Image (cartoon, rainbow, N blue to C red):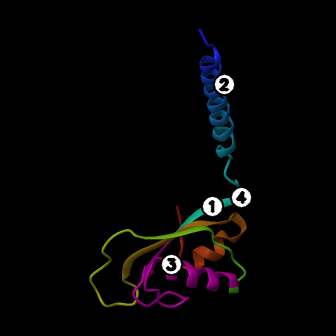
């Protein structure tokens, strides 16, 4: 009886288990305690950075504006959360929502810009 296939199977199984254990540990990093999650609902025309026509453009123009103000939006993402309000006022929301995190020291500044703490 040849034991090479059995040894190879044990080696392969052991290697996969070791790889899984290492990869799971590396993904479990604690989030930065100095970062605070924030959200901004895009409006029809009252956004300080101008109107964005899609999620990528919203991230780009908002980050550019925030950088000009000395602020950084970490891990930005934008998505369509709903159909938006049916009205023509500038303050009506479009349904696009920008989310990310900011340093806790920057929280008052982004709240003043219309973001909400999550």
Residue placed most toward the observer, 67 or 89: 67
Sequence-first tag of 4 and 2: 2
Q: Which residue is mark 4?
A: 34
Q: Which residue is mark 1?
A: 36
From the image, state whether disc 4 or disc 2 is nearer to you.
Answer: 2
Residue placed most toward the observer, 73 or 26: 26
Q: Which residues are magenta?
A: 40-67
53 part of magenta stretch: yes
Q: Quadrant of residue 105?
A: bottom right
Residue 17, position in %: x, y? 63, 29
Q: Which residue is mark 3?
A: 56
On the rendered image, what quadrant is the N terminus found in?
top right
Between the C-alphas of marks 2 and 1, the distance is 45 Å
Sequence-first tag of 3 and 4: 4
What label sits on residue 11 in the rendered view? 2
**Secondary structure of the residue carrying numbered label 3:** helix
What label sits on residue 60 in the rendered view? none
Crowding near pointer 3: few (<14 within 10 Å), some, many (20+)? some
**Secondary structure of the residue carrying numbered label 1:** strand
Between the C-alphas of marks 4 and 1, the distance is 7 Å
Label pair 2/1, CB-CB below 8 angstroms: no
**Secondary structure of the residue carrying numbered label 4:** loop
């Amino acid at each position: 009886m040849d034991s090479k296939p059995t040894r190879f199977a044990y080696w392969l199984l052991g290697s996969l288990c070791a790889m899984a254990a290492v990869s799971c540990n590396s993904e479990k990093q604690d989030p930065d305690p100095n970062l605070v999650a924030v959200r901004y609902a895009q409006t029809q025309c009252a956004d300080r950075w101008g109107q964005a026509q899609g999620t990528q453009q919203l991230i780009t123009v908002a980050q550019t504006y925030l950088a000009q103000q000395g602020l950084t939006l970490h891990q930005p993402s934008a998505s369509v959360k709903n159909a938006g309000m049916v009205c023509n006022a500038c303050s009506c929301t479009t349904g696009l929502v920008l989310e990310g995190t900011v340093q806790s020291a920057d929280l008052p500044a982004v709240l003043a810009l219309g973001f909400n703490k999550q």
